[in-house]
Amino acid sequence: MSEIQIAAQLYTLRSFLKTPSDIAETMKKVKAIGYDAVQVSGVGPIDPYELKKIVDGEGLTICATHVSFDSMRDETSRVIDEHKLWGCKHIAIGGMPTVYRNAEGFKKFAVEASEVVRRFAEAGLTFSYHNHSFELEKFDGRLGLDILFEDADPDLFNFEIDTYWIQNGGGDPAAWIRKVKGRGPLVHFKDMTVRDAKPIMAEVGEGNLNWPAILDACKDSGVEWYIVEQDICERDPFESLGISLKNLKAMGLS
């Protein structure tokens, strides 16, 4: 895409999203920081129409979501209807259900998820899988993430590569972004620093990740949305989102 699109992952602000009034106030702050789009995740109970009214009122776009696999499978029509209401075409899963996290489970999930999300594709929506680090465990010589990449339907099963978690699992974020080219419309940006020999999540540009390589990979791979997330912040989460956005702009993104 010719225009780089940056969004804030609302999971970063989950402690400030418990009620509709919390959500309204938080969306106002997100817009004031400088974001024009959000990924909906970690949001408390709210009527989908009210959420649309809030984000529209602040001039925000819902670029993507995180939806549980149970909801995708058991409430498919509702999930589709909500995304149509919001004008959001990207549905992602925040993590693989625990029951699948074994050698046979990865293969099973690749097949079962492909079937579940077929109706999303028929409705003009996309599905992406968000990784953590456990997917970089090897099973019979194959990484779990490779099993998903190779065994799932390539026309239905996309990826939301998370830079921190790939690095945390011993992988190369830029290499993985390139690997899923054509199947990676979303990328999660978060940095990693080290303190007392332990990895710590950091604002983008404040850690040790190779951002020039990551950004080049995103551009070359046609990533649609650069989504800033920080699961754990050592300062006010709103401040952390602001620092990441400022640093990304200093890197040439806008």
Image (cartoon, helix red, strand yellow):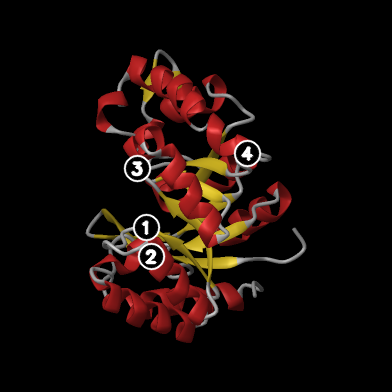
Please state the horizontal and vertical placement of residue 132, each as a whole percent of the image. 37, 43
Counting residues from the N terminus, which is met first, the one under dot 3 or under dot 2? 2
Residue at the spot 30% in from the left edge and 21% down from the top edge? 102
Counting residues from the N terminus, which is met first, the one under dot 4 or under dot 1? 1
Residue behind mark 1: 41
Counting residues from the N terminus, which is met first, the one under dot 1 or under dot 3? 1
Counting residues from the N terminus, which is met first, the one under dot 4 or under dot 3? 3
Q: Judging from the image, what secondary structure is the residue with disc 4 in?
A: loop
Please state which amino acid type lies under the numbered disc 1. Ser
Q: CA distance from mark 4 to mark 3?
A: 20 Å
Q: CA distance from mark 4 to mark 1?
A: 21 Å
Which disc number belongs to residue 183? 4
- Residue 178 to residue 144: above or below: below
The residue closer to the viewer here, 144 or 172, is: 144
Q: Quadrant of residue 175?
A: top right
Residue furthest out toward the right: 2
Residue behind mark 3: 68
- Residue 110 to residue 75: above or below: above
- Asked whether disc 1 touches disc 2, contact meaning CB atoms under 8 Å apart, the reply is yes
Please state the horizontal and vertical placement of residue 66, each as a whole percent of the image. 41, 50
In which quadrant is the N terminus drawn?
Answer: bottom right
In the rendered structure, the answer to whether residue 180 lies left or right of residue 236 reads: right
Q: CA distance from mark 1 to mark 3?
A: 10 Å
Residue behind mark 2: 10
Q: Judging from the image, what secondary structure is the residue with disc 1 in?
A: loop
Counting residues from the N terminus, which is met first, the one under dot 4 or under dot 2? 2
Q: Quadrant of residue 213?
A: bottom right
Which disc number belongs to residue 167? none
